[in-house]
Amino acid sequence: MSEGRGLPARPIARDPRAQRPSWGSVTRNGAHNLREGDEERSSAPRRPPRGVPERDRRDRPEVPEARYAVKGEGERSIVTAHDRAEARRAAMAAAKVPTTKRPQRRRKLPVDVASELGSAVPARYLARVELRLADASRAYSRDRYPEALTILRELIRTTTQVAAVRELYGLTLYRLGRWKEAIRELTAFHELSGSVDQHPVLADCERALRHHDRVTELWNELRQYGAGSDVLAEGRLVMAGSLADRDRIAEAIELLNPSATRAVRKPLERHLRQWYALADLYERSGDIPRARELFRKVVDADSELSDALERLAALR
């Protein structure tokens, strides 16, 4: 989580005195094991078409196409789909035909999460808990964190031993900048599941509280557990950010340099974020040519990533 993510699409406020973008924070979008069907499979935020606000596109009603019915010679009236629907409802009411509501589509959880809930929640409450957890996951994936928080507070009372709930609750608190509460929930998630997938987020919370020794402990745990490439890259970014916070720029560069300068044919997001972070560190150290080179690599791969284009222009 990702959920932040080294180069925040939406920067998370931290220290107002900070002079640099918070590239070390982790922005994971959604709990790693909470996905809502095919619609929610991508962990990266979808970009709306330019010039069309997401709210406008979502809330804009679909206007039915007007159809013309001839009433008489030279006379026309516009009969819309709305008109036909109203006429049909009136006819059904006159004939006393009961109308039926369209059944609500049930949002499903992954099998492992549903199984975990089934073991922890009484059968009579299970269906509602599953639906509410899916609602919370959906709200989180759409950046509606206060809404997700309200739902999860309701659920946490009866699901304290469900790792998936504690994980999503912790990620939501993290997104809202509530570091101490996020640490409590993500630590519980780790203890319940044994997973280190959220260690980078946990470390970033500790970093925000200036608990740098704890950041180092979590980074060492992450390496010892043999985490996946994406999770390890996130942890490395947070650790480098912690070093930079203490003006240990050379050490931060040394930590990122081997992985960030490796030749990559098709760079993934984690590569771009490490390039950006390393470019930032080189600029801070006074090595402008190296900083310019890395910002150029980021821009060539994705010109819309963070403010890389502006940073590059400033270095010219």
Image: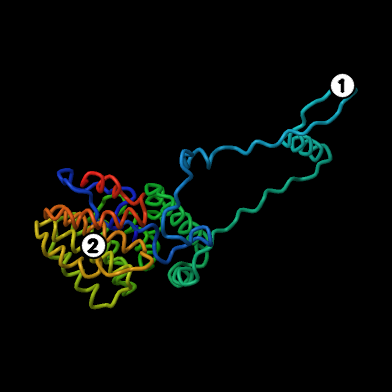
State the image coordinates of residue 211 (x, y, percent, origin top left): 14, 60
State the image coordinates of residue 201 (x, y, percent, origin top left): 27, 61
77 relative position to 4: left or right: right
What amino acid does circle 1 point to? Gly
Tag on residue 39? none
Residue at image point 48% right, 60% down: 129
What amino acid does circle 2 point to? Leu
State the image coordinates of residue 132 (x, y, percent, origin top left): 47, 56
The single residue placed furthest to the left in the displayed view is 247
3 relative position to 142: left or right: left
Quarter-wise, where is residue 24 in the image? Answer: bottom left
Residue at image point 80% right, 31% down: 68
Q: Secondary structure at mark 2?
A: helix
N-terminal of the pair, mark 2 or mark 1, is 1
Query: Which one is nearer the viewer's eye here, 259 or 158?
Result: 259
Quarter-wise, where is residue 173 in the image? Answer: bottom left
Query: Which one is nearer the viewer's eye here, 133 or 144?
Result: 144
The single residue placed furthest to the top in the displayed view is 74
Disc 2 from disc 1: Cα separation: 73 Å
Tag on residue 237? 2
Label 1 neighbour load within 10 Å: few <14, some 14-19, many 20+:
few
Q: Secondary structure at mark 1?
A: loop
Label 2 neighbour load within 10 Å: few <14, some 14-19, many 20+:
many
State the image coordinates of residue 268 (x, y, percent, origin top left): 37, 64
The single residue placed furthest to the right in the displayed view is 73
66 relative position to 178: left or right: right
Q: Which residue is mark 1?
A: 74
Is residue 139 positioned above or below 254 on the image? above
